[in-house]
Structures are given as structure tokens and as C-alpha cells.
Image (cartoon, rainbow, N blue to C red):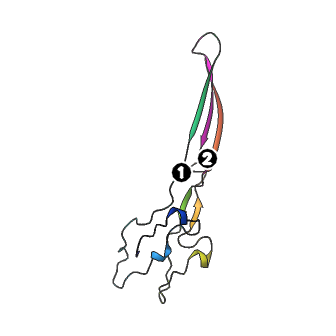
Amino acid sequence: MTGNQNLPRSERTALAFIDTKCVAPGLKGSIGNDSGVDTVRGPGLNNWDISIFKKFNYGESAERYIQLRLEMYNAFNHTNWATMNSTAQINPNTGQIVNLPSAVGRDGFGALTAVRATGLPGSPRIVQLAAKVYF
């Protein structure tokens, strides 16, 4: 890494999530970890889980009621990315990155490659409606 690879939020896209110009081949004699550990910030998680409950009494006892429940997971259906291609393939003769999205397409270096699977935090929106009867 030769600089700050984190692009400003306004410049990030699915095909260019990091600044790939900041990546260069290691110097001769380098062991490969000169840039530090965990220097690339991946996509964050934007997840809103919302529940709404309403209690309806029935009968003469306050202990008898029906509870309606509406639960939404990722209520605003925000796309949450799971992985990013963080492997740069560098031509040893020219020192150029050969797997940029402009050359190889959607799965190039620095591109977001997959969304979170269903059932994980940040997966596509799930809505469920339920009723509980207390007696």
C-alpha cells in the first residue's frame, strides 16, 4: 500500500470500492507485510430490525389477551455486501495490476463480489406476522 486506499463514500461503487492506485508490488527483499495488517476497510453493515407489538384484551381478566406481532429484519432492505476481492494480481514484468474490474469485469480487484446470504444479519428483508394468545 502506498497511501490511503479507502475511497470517500461518494466515490465508492460496486466495481471500485477501494482506490486500487494505492497498491504497488513489494520492494525486493520485502517479506510481503510491509503495508501492515487489516489496512483495507471493507463494506459496513446497515441493518435495522424492527418489531411492533399490540395487545388486545379479551374476557374479564387482564391476564387474557391476544398479542399481534409484526417483525421486520433489515426493514429498509439495504444491500449489505459480504465480500470484496482483495487479491491483486500483479504482472512481474510491468508491475501493473492485471485483474482490475475494467479488464476482467465484475469480479476484479477492489470490487464487491457477493451480498449476505439469507438468514445472516444484513440479509434481504424478512417480514413476519404472528399472533400469541395468552389465557
Query: Which type of secondary structure does the marked residue at label 1 adopt?
Result: loop
Is 89 left, or right, of 26 in this rendering? Answer: right
Q: Amino acid at mark 1?
A: Asn
Image x and y of residue 8, in percent: 49, 64
- Which residue is painted at 44% across and 80% down in the image? 24
- Which residue is painted at 36% across and 85% down in the image? 28
Q: Which mark is residue 76?
A: 2
For disc 2, the neighbor class at 10 Å (few under 14, some 14 to 19, many from 20) is: some
**Is residue 23 or residue 84 the one in the foreground?**
23
The residue labelled by disc 1 is: 46
Query: Which type of secondary structure does the marked residue at label 2 adopt?
Result: loop
For disc 1, the neighbor class at 10 Å (few under 14, some 14 to 19, many from 20) is: some
Quadrant where the image shows the C terminus: top right
Image x and y of residue 37, in percent: 37, 67
Disc 1 and disc 2 in contact, CB within 8 angstroms: yes
Q: Is residue 118 above or below residue 50?
A: below
Q: Is residue 33 above or below residue 74?
A: below
Give the magenta range: 61-79
Instruction: Name the residue at the left extreme.
Output: 29
Instruction: Name the residue at the front extreme.
Output: 10
Is 127 left, or right, of 95 in this rendering? Answer: right
